[in-house]
Amino acid sequence: MDFLSIFTLFFSVVLSSLLVFFIKFKAGIIRLLLYFSGAFLLTVAFTQIIPEIFNHSHNSNLGYFVLVGFFIQIILEYFSGGVDHGHHHEEIEHSENHSHTHFNPLGLLIGISLHAFFEGMPFSGHFHEHNHTENMLLVGIIIHKIPIAIVLMSLFLGAGYSKTKSFLLLFLFALAAPFGSIASYLGGHFIHDVESYYQIIMALVVGIFFHIATVILYEGEKGHKFNLRKFLIIIVGVGAAILVNQFH
């Protein structure tokens, strides 16, 4: 098991959610964090994960698994309401004004947790020869989890939940990625071709990232106006992913 990655995935959610108790996050700040994370994830997918899994794969059906991942994320959004790419960041404004928001907490938790479950699958510990790619993926996922955990905690507090109940719900979400790693680890014991197993998992994750990143980056501003600040943050996110990849 890749315990360091599992602990990092878990505590990135826990610590990020606690920030809400000490810092008041404006919706605009959350948007910028999401733009950065979307650009980072997309760059990691195009420059690291896709070349690796397709250059070393003899599986002609691998592209279909990318497509499956894409549609998995579409289905998950019916439960999560798009929290994984920031659809509810405006609700932070409501929580600041003590105006209760209304949503289905169970559906939200199921959708976002299943999303995190898939994200955790590459970190089972079976794929030691792909450490660099896993590390890049881990950085991207953590950057993505920070604004999501903030939005979730703000949503729960804005819905009138107590701090304790809100934190417990975030704790359950934080466990989802480690459970994905554990499930992948256990499944790997029944797979003889570990390399193909790795490629399929990564293809699914790439498909999920494609949907999230493209929605984050290309869901236009009102009137589809050009937003210079958004564009610059996206460029910074791309550049950061390239630098981390080069100097890792």
Image (tube, helix red, strand yellow):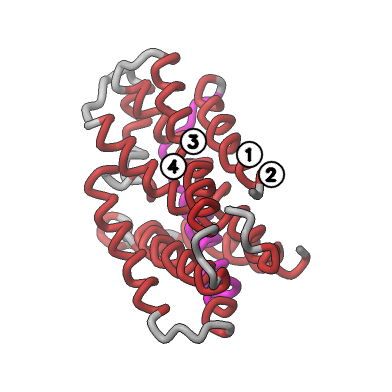
Q: Secondary structure at mark 4?
A: helix
Cβ atoms at labels 1 and 2 below 8 Å apart: yes
Q: Can I make out residue 226 in this image?
A: no
Between 227 and 9, the one nearer to me in the picture:
9
Quadrant of the snapshot with the C terminus: bottom right
Q: Residue at 43%, 61% (x, y): give it.
A: 209
Among numbered discs 4 and 1, the one appearing first in the sequence: 1
Q: Residue at 52%, 61% (x, y): give it.
A: 41
* Residue 20 at x, y percent in the picture: 50, 25
Numbered disc in front, either 4 or 2: 2
Amino acid carrying label 1: it is: Phe
Image position of 236 (left or right of 85): right
Q: Residues within 10 Å of mark 1 (few under 14, many from 20)?
A: some
Amino acid carrying label 2: it is: Leu
Amino acid carrying label 4: it is: Gly
Between 54 and 103, the one nearer to me in the picture:
54
Q: Which mark is residue 28?
A: 4
Q: Residues within 10 Å of mark 3 (few under 14, many from 20)?
A: many
Q: Which residues are magenta?
A: 23-50
* Residue 144 at x, y percent in the picture: 51, 49
Among numbered discs 3 and 1, the one appearing first in the sequence: 1
Q: Cα distance, mark 3 to mark 1?
A: 10 Å
Let me know if residue 45 is in the magenta part: yes
Q: Which mark is residue 68?
A: none
Residue linked to disc 3: 175
Q: Cα distance, mark 2 to mark 3?
A: 14 Å
Q: Cα distance, mark 3 to mark 4?
A: 28 Å
Residue linked to disc 2: 4
* Residue 13 at x, y percent in the picture: 53, 36
